[in-house]
Image (cartoon, rainbow, N blue to C red):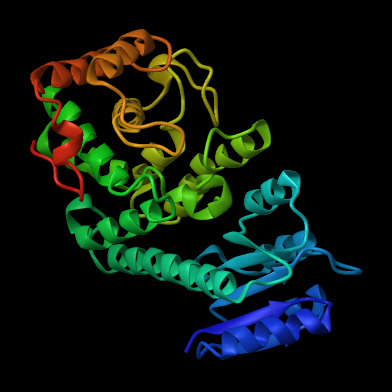
Amino acid sequence: MDWIVIVDDDTANLIQAGKILSSRDMRVTALRSGSALLKFISSNTPDLIMLDIRMPEMDGFETLIRLREIMPPEQEIPVIFLTGSDTPEAETRGLQLGAMDFIRKPFVAEVLVLRVQHTLQLVRLQRDLYAEVKKKHADYESLSLHLIQALAETIDAKDKYTNGHSERVASYSREIARRCGFDQKHQEEIYIMGLLHDVGKIGVPDRVINKRGRLNDDEYEIIKIHPGKGASILEKIVEMPRLKIGARWHHERYDGTGYPDGLAGEDIPVEARIIAVADAYDAMTSSRSYRSVMEQEKVRNELEKAKGTQLDPTFAQIMIGMIDEDEEYLMHERTEGGQHDN
């Protein structure tokens, strides 16, 4: 039975959330302050904490900061913030502090349950991955691939427009690496990095990921958190220090205007430069809320224009070669559902 701790100074909110979650066979503990939570955590380990932002004496942000200070990284408990505020600034700060999600008040029962279940599922997959690594040798061959694929699929499921995205990016990346002459081990390393490149989207609110139309400036700032968040998740696998490369740097640009670190040219790790090309191709050849799949010739032209600015020119040219071989424009179609011919 999952154990949820709810922290809110409003008794009515505690009662309502408690009833909703208890009715779904979850164990619920209600607390009324951040200090009460810190004392409780010293001798208890729940599966999830739901934490109100606005509370007297110690607000949710300060509570989370102090919680992270007293708990070792490997024992971190996932946190969802409860908020009546819609401000992007509050969401951005919460995500930067390590919150997994936000839930609006007043609660909508089904939304509350789905957000909690989704967060618990992601955390279990993440912990299973860590456990798999620890019990085997510190090498990519020792990873349980089905676990990584399950995690990637769960991440993609947050966005109804990106089904199979991580698998396709991973497959394109591996093929680019193969054509560059990388050895088999390095190809598979890049494939795993590609599968996990978007793992940081675990911490991006669904309303931003699934927005119809383009993001505004505030929403874009929230999205820009996901590379750092992804690196933070993957760097906890200390046996594999390189695993975070794709997650952290796949949005860097060859001309140095990308994020999160503003790296340029060959200062960007080669694996991230390859994944960036594959990611750009898949973004253009997949349906989005604001457009359908782009025509193949337009995709090719966009990649040509991006050489040396957004993308590494060598790897972009290899992707263009793959497009030219794909005369029937089948590459994106035959990769639906995670299948790709190498």
Q: Quadrant of the C terminus?
A: top left
Question: What residue is at 33 percent from the left and 50 percent from the top?
Answer: 240
Q: Is 171 or 262 nearer to us in this picture?
A: 171
Look at the image and tell me whether residue 39 can be seen.
no
Identify which residue is drawn at 54% across, 23% down. 262
Q: Is residue 97 above or below residue 117?
A: above
Q: Quadrant of residue 41?
A: bottom right
Measured from the top left, where is residue 67 in percent x and y?
69, 67
Total labels: the figure holds: 0
At which x and y percent is residue 290? 46, 33
Can you see residue 330? yes
- From the viewer's perspective, tell me whether residue 144 is left or right of residue 80: left
x and y percentages locating residue 93 in the rendered image = 71, 48
Foreground: 98 or 245?
A: 98
Q: In the rendered image of this protein, does residue 223 appear above or below residue 112?
A: above
Name the residue at 56% across, 37% down.
224
Residue 117 falls left or right of residue 296: right
* Percent position of residue 10, x then y: 83, 78
Q: Is residue 318 left or right of residue 262?
A: left
Give the side of residue 315 with respect to residue 58, left or right.
left
Q: Residue drawn at (37%, 42%), measured in percent from left and top? A: 197
